[in-house]
Structures are given as structure tokens and as C-alpha cells.
Amino acid sequence: MDNLTIGLLLICVLFLLVLLGMRIGIALLAVAFCGVWIIRDNFDLSMRLMSISAYNGVSSYLFATIPLFVLMGYLVSVSNVGKDTFDVAEIGLRRVLGGLGVATVAANTIFAAVTGVSIASAAVFTKVAVPEMVRHGYRPSFSCGAVAGSSVLGMLVPPSLLLIIYGVLAEQSIGKMFLAGLIPGLVLAGGFVLLIVGLARFAPSVVFADPEAPRDRTTLARDDDMSGREMVLKLIPIMLLVTCVLGGLYSGVFTPTEAGGVGAFAAFVIALARRSLDWATIWDVLVRTGTISVGILLLLVAANFYGQMLAVAGIPSAISELVAQSGLGAYGFLLLYVVLVLLLGMILDSTSILLIVVPIAAPIALHLGFDLIHFGIITVIAVEVGLLSPPFGISIFTVHAALDDAKTPLEAIFAGTLPFVGVMLGTLALIAAFPGLLYY
């Protein structure tokens, strides 16, 4: 049996182990270790490559970016900055038909710009936005769909953990990945806004429980008003964070790691000023940050080792030659790749998909002439669709769990997100066809 056949069989084994419930990090390590051992018939070499992967993972300065942004995201969540942002957006858009849905997208976009975690956005805005939308006559399924759909912006609008993970796996600049994700994130948010306004006007039965009631826009007004000064005070914390993190990053004052450190410190100061922290909350935030950061670090170490095994087996070069000989061309390969990622999104979480496919696909894309920054944005958008795709749809399950309402079943939330999935697929096609939209 040649090395290529062994490598392909090991990839099949990896999928089987993950589907059987094995942790993705353990499965990657096990398959990579056994693969190198079998292909090279050298146990010591396999041990040495695994130790090198572990050392590179721990020693890299870049990995400090992950815990800093995760810490910042949790501090922002506990300080109720998300609720304040939604309140201001709600007041500003209350006269717009479908304004509460637009406010949800706007607040989620700003919140994503300082957290980078879709699950945090989904959990926060399920509690904040859904009850308010339902109270004003929106369908519960559409309300949940708007929250789940706009929550995926956290994985594209920088800073984003998925962009960091892709950058590490594909050996691309994290700063350039952040810059490249900004315009597609805004395009996606704009698409969501147009979708909500269009449905509210031309298909109100999809959006509202009583399609006739919202024709009187005064029904969308809040019971309590807010002065301009109160709105500014509520927006100061989020604008401070955006200025510190994105302003410093895009101006070149901070590296991504430094931006994470400044953002985490600013979020800590804001949480203290708003009296959102006690010792128990601080401990909980630190434990959650450590748990997520260590888990991601282990995954990246395992993925690095897995990529080395694939190179030893000759998988990327063999697939590149196969694509070249098949006549599919670069965009034919891209189409098949996107379809594969979308299918994987139905059964795996987003991080697992990146860890499995990027080490294989990135070298092939580079060989076919793709810019790996552009390829990464396409990958992340495709992976985001998986967050809303049955049967896994982790954002859907997060919204359902946070809502905890038996009157809104899981199937209804999935149905409510379908229009947003359509917008995401349209944005994906637009970015793939016009790489000049990216700025980095």
C-alpha cells in the first residue's frame, strides 16, 4: 500500500472517529501520530514530530492573541454592553418598518467587532432582543432567526477567533486576515438589513405575527424614551473598545496581540466602572477564558501535527495534480471545496472543519493561484453557514437554549434562519467572484 492510499484512509478514519464522538483534538493527534509511524515505519520520528508541533504551538507569540480576545469578549458580555448597544439601536430605528430586526443586526455587528465569538453574541441577544421583538409583534421564529443569523458576524467581523485559527493554520498574517474580513462583514450585515426591511415591506406575514399591525409605525415605539445624552453615554463603552482595538490595529499602532491586550484591559476597566465584576464573576471569567484558550491551543497543536502527516503522505500535492488533470480549473476546485465545507457544517462545529480541511486545501489553493487571504475569507463564510445548518447548527442550539421557551421549537428557529442563510450564500458568491472587494 503506497503512502497516498494510507493518507486517504487515515483521513477517512479521522472523520469516523469524530462522528463517533471522539474529541477532535485527540482524533487529530491519534491519526497524525499513527500516520507518520505507519508511513515512515519509525516510532521515534513520529514522537519527534509531535513534540516539535507542541513546542511550536506553545512558544509562538501569536497564540497570545487568542486568550486576550476571549477574555475581552467575556468581560464585554458580563458588563451588559451588548444590551446598551441594542437599546440605542432600537431607539434610533424605531420608526423604520422592521426596525427592531435592523437594530438587532446593527447591535450584533458592533458587538462582534469587540468580541469575535458568535456564541457569545447569540446568547446575549437572545436574552436582550428576542423578548423585545416578540413584544412588538414579531414572530418568535423570525426573531430567533434574526439573532442567530446576525450572530455569525462574530466569526467574520474582526477580531474573530476563526480568522485567527485560519491564519495560524495557513501561515497567513493575522493582521491581514482582520483587515480582509472587515468589508465582507459589513457587506453581510448590509445584506441582512436589506433582507429584514424587504421582508417587512413585501412579505410581512414572514416577519410579523399580525401582518397588518406594523403598518402603523408608531406601534414600534418604545414605552420609555431616551435622551440624546443617555444614548451617547450608553454608546461610550462600545465605541471606546472599537477605537482601542480596531483603530489601533488598522492604524498600525498595535499588532494583533497588542490590540488584544489593550482591548482586554479596556474591557476590564469598563466592567469595573459599571460595577459588573465581583470576585465570583472574575473567577468565572478567568476559568472560562482559560478553558477555551487551552482547548484552542491543543487543537492548533494537533492540527499542525496533522498537516505534517498529510505532507509526509503527499496528500496536498496529489490532490493538486488530480485537480489539474481533471480540467476543473481553480474555480471548479473552489466550488467543490465550498460544497464540502457546507456539508461538513451540517455535522461538525466550525473549528473542527477548519482543522480538518485547511491543512489539505490551503496548499492546493496556493498551487492553483489563489491568494490565501481571499481563500480564507471564503472558507470562514462557508464555515459560518454551518453554524446555521441542521442538524448541528450550534448557533441555533445556543439561541434555543438561551430562550428556553417551549412555544418556540428548534424547527421553528431553523426555519427562521433560512432567509439569512440565503444572504450568506449570496455574499459568499460575491466575495468569491470579486476578490477586489477585500482590503488588506
Image: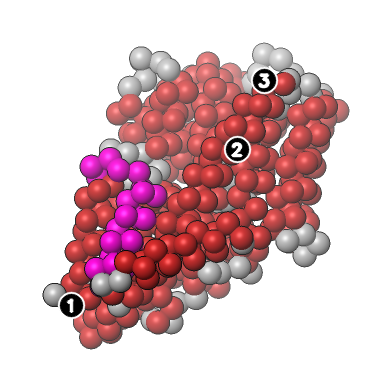
Q: Residue at the spot x=77%, y=59% of the render?
A: 254
Looking at the picture, which amino acid does disc 2 mark? Answer: Thr
Q: Position of residue 17 (x, y in %)?
A: 25, 48
Question: Between residues 247 and 171, which one lies in front from this camera angle?
Answer: 171
Q: Residue at the spot x=54%, y=61% of the render?
A: 55
Q: Position of residue 324 (x, y in %)?
A: 28, 84
Looking at the picture, which amino acid does disc 3 mark? Answer: Ala
Looking at the picture, which amino acid does disc 1 mark? Answer: Asp
Q: What numbered label is drawn on residue 280?
A: 3
Q: CA distance from mark 2 to mark 3?
A: 14 Å
Q: What numbered label is drawn on residue 306?
A: none
Residue 71: say if magenta: no
Question: Residue tagged by mark 1?
Answer: 2
Q: Residues within 10 Å of mark 3 (few under 14, many from 20)?
A: few
- Quadrant of the snapshot with the N terminus: bottom left
Residue 218, above or below 397: above
Q: CA distance from mark 2 to mark 1?
A: 44 Å
